[in-house]
Image (cartoon, grey):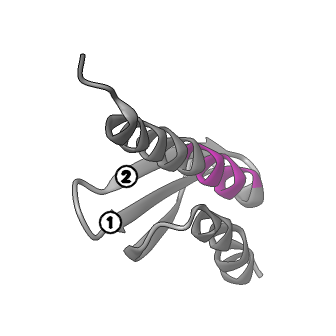
Amino acid sequence: MVPGYVREKMEGVKRFGEEFKRLEVILDLENGETLCEAILHRHRGEPLVAHDRSRDPRAAVDGAEARLERQVVRNKEKHSRKGRRRVS
């Protein structure tokens, strides 16, 4: 049940229009909490990594996905502003 949920949830990262090599999601159970680590490998640059932990596995996946999306948006905004700068 959780692997299908992870795949469905992480598909949302694709909507930002960037091309990615692959996405790794690691789920681990530690002291009754689920640890979720999402590693997004991009074509250029360093991979983006997001972590979250929760007692509910779905909440851990949701949190990691939200953090990963914020990183993708922040990275995209950072690089799109460079092209619009004016040289005075």
Q: Judge whether 25 appears above or below 60 on screen.
A: below
Compared to residue 27, the image places residue 83 above or below, namely above
Residue depicted at 41% across the width and 35% down the height: 81
Residue type indicated by callout 1: Arg
Q: Kindly identify the residue that appears in the image at 62 percent across and 54 percent down.
A: 65
- Whether residue 58 is in magenta: the answer is no
Q: Nearer the viewer, residue 25 or 75?
A: 75
In front: 67, or 51?
67
Residue at screen point 55% across, 67% down: 17
Looking at the image, residue 49 sits to the left or right of residue 73; the answer is left
Residue kind at label 2, given as amino acid type: Leu
86 relative to 80 in the view: left or right: left
Crowd around label 2: few <14 · some 14–19 · many ≥20 (10 Å):
some
Q: Which image quarter: residue 88?
A: top left
- Which residue in the structure is indicated by mark 2? 48
Mark 1 or 2, nearer chain start: 1
Numbered range of the magenta stretch: 59-67
CB within 8 Å, label 1 to label 2: yes
Q: Residue at position x 32%, y 26% from top? A: 86
Residue that numbered label 1 is attached to: 42
